[in-house]
Amino acid sequence: MTANDKKKAFINIGIIVLIIAIIAGGWTYFANKTKTKSSDHWYRIKKSKEIKIGLDDTFIPMGFRNKSGKLIGFDVDLANATFKKLGIKVEWEPINWSTKEQLLNDGQIDAIWNGYTISAARKKKVAFSIPYKKGTQVLVTLSKDKINSFADMKGKTLGLQNGSTAQTQFQQYKNLLKKYVKGTPQKYDTFDKAFMDLKAGRIQGILVDSMYAGYYVKHLSDSQDYKIIYGGYPTDENGVGFRKSDLKLREEVNTVLKKFQQNGKMKSLQEKWFGKADSGLK
């Protein structure tokens, strides 16, 4: 082989190597794009025109059953309206609230939409939508027990929902209510059970979201027998929880929520469920 032939062979080998590198790079790019697309469940949801949302179906007034068993509430209305805009039907899935993030990330539900408070701890597990509602934690007691402040809960038993923001903030803000109550709070799967125990005298107070407390107490036949006490817990924000991989799904929901905040739809739903004195986001 002459020197010229060797030079040509070397050039040909170089060209072949370059072509292989380009093909391999293109394949890697395509594979990564495909993986990203498949990991975002928006494409499946858009194709099937159905999304499964998890909720605690006793959480008044966000999502609960009326006397005929129909699921109603602020979040139910808002989510249904949001996905109607996107041409998608919502399938509501009642869940154990304490396992909500696990159910979401295991793929058993596609979103958490149920007065779901945005927090630093939860951001490690899920991706949140923009905030759409504000609230705080309050103490509900019976008027006959003459509890007028957090300090009056000294030596008394508290109830709260397992896995709730109330449970988290009770532990986090030790100088508000924790320093007064007796022992460990009684934990409940749902708040309606806590209200039953409050009325029976088995507990003397419930730490609960202000939206739930206000609506629930207002609609009781003996609402005058209850007292709602604010004691300094911070204002928190509600958002929709998504898997971190569901970037497009979150983007689509955020776009609709922003439109509802601009065109008055959000305000009308807030007034429907909370009245004009609503403290939610505008």
Image (cartoon, rainbow, N blue to C red):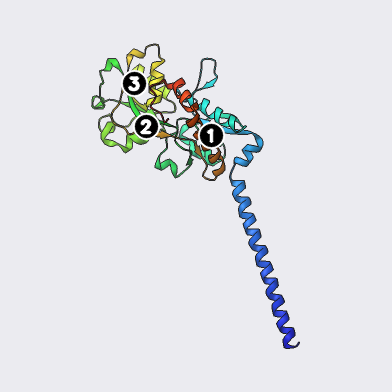
Where is residue 91? Give x, y as percent: 59, 29
- Residue furthest out toward the bottom: 2
Label 3–label 1 contact, CB within 8 A: no
In the image, residue 237 above or below residue 70: below
Q: Earlier in the sequence, mark 3 or mark 2?
A: 2
For residue 245, side relative to residue 116 (left or right): right
Q: Earlier in the sequence, mark 1 or mark 2?
A: 2
Using a 10 Å C-alpha cutoff, classify the residue at mark 1 as few (fewer than 14 neighbours), some (14 to 19) or many (20 or more): some
For marks 3 and 2, give the one nearer the viewer.
2
For marks 3 and 1, give the one nearer the viewer.
1
> Label 1 belongs to which residue?
256
- Residue 142: which disc? none
* Residue 51 visible to the viewer: yes
Using a 10 Å C-alpha cutoff, classify the residue at mark 3 as few (fewer than 14 neighbours), some (14 to 19) or many (20 or more): some
Q: Quadrant of the C terminus?
A: top left
Q: Amino acid at mark 1?
A: Val
> Label 3 belongs to which residue?
202
> Label 2 belongs to which residue?
166
Q: Amino acid at mark 3?
A: Arg
